[in-house]
Image (spheres, coloured by chain):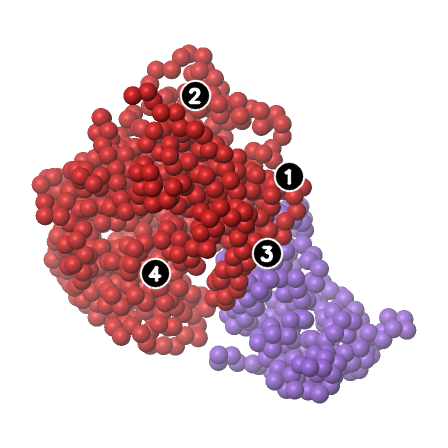
């Protein structure tokens, strides 16, 4: 594959995050380059999800700097992350269960809708034009992820693997430049995992989306990521390409366990 | 010959490219093809199709495609792939559609046998298969793909985007504007128009060469008998490599000029069917069966009142629905009830099934259970059987309106002669017969006898009204050790009509009794088990539950009760059976790609089970290797219980 990895777009410098006396993250620095697939791994409670939440502004670290495209980022809120083209999926699926797949994915376009509430309510003028445009984008995502057959199905009725795919679809509908995936493959069977891997690689390849993902399945991580950062008890213990990380003594001890 | 008479009537339109040009000239704006793209149905008119076919044909020519070349076509039903067929025919080439879900190694034989230089595929998945076997197909030169997704990093020079091909073609067409018309003019009705490979139930697949004249004659006959016209719609969703799809979606569409509609994906067929509401629908019995099963499952989950209404009106339909459809006289009371039922049940049900606009629905490919057949007809859907093989363009017998018999496949179609051989085999002759098997003069000679009749290999007889009844494959019909006839298919079809039974294989040739393997229907039995609070972990577990065995035993005994009434098959009652621990699967070679049981293979593979059935054992351990979709292998094992079914004493008629 002839993928071009660009410059650093997100640089985290000496991040520390505390909840009261509990240290979730201690002095962590790493960066993400444009167009790469960056994995964050580590045992349970290592601070992986906290790290993701720091990136998209849910948590605000007490110490450290976050550089976004070369400029230091001010304290920000999650909705601002969306405006900066950062989209994410969640470890526990966070979809609207009673709504159809189509409607769920449409919500991914919400930050791009300009018509007023009243116009939307009356399905009038700009709102109507806008919705047609957005629907087209959404249909492209549906086609991309091959979920045409469940377009009109309420999300609550879908099996877990497909719900995960719908969540990815919603994130993609926002046309993000960076995608944060929190355990996209947890609880899936082999076939579903293969599909998901393929979709992640396709997204990265076709749209050039930068992807930061947390994952437990080591096979998957080693196969698809360009670089891996390893956390343990809120500290960074390894960082590099998959092969480096695999042979790192600390990582083997802390995470993979003896015998691997 | 009747074939020639038909050709004269179409006034020089005796090849498919000419038919296309004719439609484009006379009704350029009428819809020819539709495809759902990004959730919206896109339409191509006949003029659009003609333009694209021109571009494709010229593109192929500029890549070096020559008269007599074979063009392999692999993919789901896509407009561009259908257009490619015509494009190849324009140049005097022969399209060879392949089953798209086959793995690369299965495609290898056909590609080698047909000496393929050009392949058109749908998408990246199929391109990867071609790359996998490219080294083994020495003749392969060019691969053209329709869907560019995921293809950005493929830099091999022999791969071509179909849109680039069309662009090349348009340039070629501008520079040599007379070229294509001259090529089309050279086309003759006696040229081979398509090569369809037989599914290979026995031995290696054989390429069946059919001429333009044969397919046009077959299409005309069907169009004439069932009054298909130009403003119809058909949903094209069955494999393009199957003769049925080629007849309906290609030959008849070009002859009658109706619109073909390509579904969005294999999973959306049901939704697309409802949106399009085709006027002509074609499905193998299995599809009608699973539609009925899904309706029944949903009815079981419906409220009490709805269930009552449904069952009441289904009884009414069973009593008089089919007669009303056939235009026979029916009492006023029943008519009134049926009218009410049509508003409350049949109409909405037809609508849910996407069959509101249906003028005629066909089924073929395997025998259909009479009860199943009756169900659709009684609901007001004009379901018909027809009969034919790849070698006869799927055109031998048709059922004319008003003369539908549940247990026959109809009368000989226009232009077709039928004869029954001494051994009961059905022999046919007519304009739709194959020209030859590709490069297999031995097989051609074997299948066509000295009088020019094609030997179908099916056993059957003509009844007093001249309707053909098919009993079974001639070679499958055996004898029990007491000399009584044993037609396994006949019994299996009876079993398969039960919604809980998906597949059955019966044994009995040269034996003293009939025994059976059963596959349960995971959907129907799973639902049944859930409602009874029976917990199960998977197919194997469910199939081994005592309650399930009891359920299947009841089905088997009903079949026995049914069989005993017919003197011909009364001896074939099922004495013992078992429920298999895994589903029969084409990936494990147990079914063909068209999902017919490969009887001998199954008998061989599960020999230990058959021995246990006949040895009178109460159970038998078995371990089987299975292939998963991703190519990995695994093992499934189970200790199968063998169940005795009640049989009924045969009452001999007093001599």
Callouts 4 and 1 in the same chain: yes
Q: Is disc 4 placed on a helix, strand or loop? A: strand
| Left or right: B173 in relation to B381 | left
Q: Which tint was used for chain A?
A: purple
Q: Secondary structure at mark 3?
A: helix
Say the numbered circle drawn on residue B319. 2
Q: Nearer the viewer, residue A199 or B463?
A: B463
In the rendering, at what x and y percent does residue B654 appear? 32, 20
Of labels 3 and 1, the one closer to you:
1
- Other-residue count near label 4 (Cα within 10 Å), few / some / many at <14 / 14–19 / ≥20: many
Circle 2: element type: helix
Q: Which residue is mark 3?
A: A162
Where does label 1 land, which residue? B531
Q: Residues within 10 Å of mark 3 (few under 14, many from 20)?
A: some
Mark 1 nearby-residue class (10 Å; few <14, some 14–19, many ≥20): few
- Rounded to the nearest angstrom, the CA distance separating label 4 from label 1 is 43 Å
- Mark 2 to mark 4: distance in Å? 46 Å
Res. B74 mark: 4
Q: Which of pointers 2 and 4 lies earlier in the amino acid sequence? A: 4
| Chain painted in red in the figure | B
């Amino acid at each position: 594959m002839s993928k071009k990895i660009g410059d650093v777009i997100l640089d985290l410098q000496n991040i520390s995050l505390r909840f009261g006396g509990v240290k979730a993250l201690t002095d962590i620095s790493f960066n993400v380059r444009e167009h790469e697939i960056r994995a964050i791994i580590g045992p349970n409670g290592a601070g992986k999800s906290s790290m993701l939440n720091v990136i998209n502004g849910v948590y605000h670290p007490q110490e450290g700097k976050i550089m976004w495209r070369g400029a230091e980022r001010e304290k920000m809120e999650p909705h601002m992350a969306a405006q900066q083209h950062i989209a994410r999926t969640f470890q526990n699926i966070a979809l609207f269960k009673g709504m159809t797949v189509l409607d769920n994915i449409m919500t991914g376009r919400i930050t791009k809708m300009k018509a007023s509430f009243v116009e939307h309510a009356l399905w009038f003028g700009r709102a109507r034009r806008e919705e047609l445009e957005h629907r087209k984008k959404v249909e492209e995502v549906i086609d991309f992820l091959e979920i045409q057959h469940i377009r009109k199905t309420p999300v609550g009725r879908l099996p877990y693997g497909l719900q995960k795919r719908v969540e990815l679809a919603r994130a993609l509908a926002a046309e993000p430049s960076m995608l944060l995936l929190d355990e996209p493959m947890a609880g899936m069977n082999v076939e579903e995992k293969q599909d998901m891997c393929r979709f992640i690689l396709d997204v990265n390849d076709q749209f050039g989306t930068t992807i930061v993902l947390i994952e437990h399945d080591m096979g998957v991580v080693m196969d698809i990521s360009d670089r891996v950062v390893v956390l343990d008890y809120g500290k960074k213990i390894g960082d590099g390409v998959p092969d480096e990380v695999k042979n790192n003594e600390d990582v083997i001890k802390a995470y993979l366990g003896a015998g691997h | 010959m009747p074939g020639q008479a038909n050709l004269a009537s179409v006034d020089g339109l005796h090849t498919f490219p000419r038919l296309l040009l004719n439609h484009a000239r006379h009704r350029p704006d009428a819809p020819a093809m539709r495809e759902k793209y990004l959730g919206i149905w896109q339409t191509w008119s006949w003029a659009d199709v003609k333009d694209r076919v021109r571009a494709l044909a010229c593109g192929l020519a500029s890549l070096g495609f020559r008269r007599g070349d074979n063009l392999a076509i692999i993919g789901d039903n896509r407009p561009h792939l259908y257009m490619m067929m015509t494009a190849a025919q324009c140049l005097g080439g022969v399209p060879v559609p392949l089953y798209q879900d086959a793995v690369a190694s299965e495609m290898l034989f056909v590609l080698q046998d047909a000496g393929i230089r050009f392949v058109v595929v749908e998408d990246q998945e199929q391109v990867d298969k071609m790359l996998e076997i490219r080294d083994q197909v020495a003749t392969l030169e060019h691969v053209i793909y329709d869907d560019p997704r995921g293809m950005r990093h493929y830099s091999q020079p022999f791969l071509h985007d179909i849109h680039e091909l069309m662009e090349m073609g348009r340039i070629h067409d501008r520079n040599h504007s007379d070229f294509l018309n001259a090529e089309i003019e050279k086309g003759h009705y006696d040229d081979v128009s398509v090569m369809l490979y037989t599914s290979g139930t026995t031995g290696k697949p054989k390429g069946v060469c059919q001429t333009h004249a044969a397919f046009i004659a077959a299409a005309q006959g069907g169009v004439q008998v069932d009054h298909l016209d130009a403003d119809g719609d058909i949903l094209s969703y069955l494999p393009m490599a199957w003769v049925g799809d080629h007849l309906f979606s290609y030959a008849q569409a070009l002859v009658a000029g109706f619109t073909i509609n390509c579904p969005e994906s294999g999973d959306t067929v049901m939704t697309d069917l409802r949106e399009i509401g085709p006027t002509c629908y074609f499905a193998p019995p299995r599809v009608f069966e699973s539609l009925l099963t899904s309706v029944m499952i949903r009815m079981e989950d419906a409220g009490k009142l709805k269930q009552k209404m449904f069952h009441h009106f289904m009884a009414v339909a069973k009593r008089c629905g089919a007669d009303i459809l056939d235009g026979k006289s029916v009492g006023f009371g029943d008519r009134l009830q049926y009218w009410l039922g049509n508003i409350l049940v049949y109409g909405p049900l037809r609508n849910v099934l996407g069959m509101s606009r249906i003028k005629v629905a066909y089924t073929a490919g395997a025998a259909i259970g009479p009860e199943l057949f009756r169900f659709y007809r009684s609901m007001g859907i004009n379901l018909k059987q027809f009969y034919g093989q790849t070698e006869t363009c799927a055109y031998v017998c048709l059922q004319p309106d008003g003369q539908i018999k549940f247990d026959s496949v109809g009368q000989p179609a226009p232009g077709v002669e039928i004869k029954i051989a001494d051994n009961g085999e059905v022999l046919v002759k007519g304009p739709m017969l194959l020209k030859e098997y590709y490069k297999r003069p031995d097989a051609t000679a074997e299948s066509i006898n000295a009088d020019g009749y094609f030997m179908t290999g099916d056993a059957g007889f003509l009844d007093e009204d001249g309707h053909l009844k098919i009993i079974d494959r001639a070679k499958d019909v055996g004898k029990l050790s007491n000399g009584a006839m044993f037609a396994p298919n006949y019994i299996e079809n009876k079993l398969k009509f039960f919604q809980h039974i998906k597949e059955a294989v019966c044994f009995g040739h040269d034996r003293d009794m009939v025994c059976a393997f059963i596959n349960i229907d995971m959907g129907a039995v799973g639902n049944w088990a859930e409602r009874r609070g029976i917990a199960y972990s998977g197919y194997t577990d469910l199939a081994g539950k005592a309650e399930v065995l009891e359920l299947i035993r009841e089905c088997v005994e009903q079949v026995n009760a049914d069989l005993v009434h017919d003197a011909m098959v009364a001896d074939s009652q099922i004495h013992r059976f078992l429920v298999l621990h895994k589903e029969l699967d084409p990936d494990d070679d147990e079914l063909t790609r068209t999902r017919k049981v490969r009887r001998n293979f199954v008998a061989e593979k599960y020999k230990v089970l058959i021995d246990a059935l006949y040895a009178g054992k109460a159970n038998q351990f078995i371990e089987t290797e299975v292939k998963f979709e991703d190519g990995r292998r695994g093992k499934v094992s189970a200790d199968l219980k063998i169940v005795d079914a009640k049989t009924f004493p045969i009452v001999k008629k007093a001599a």
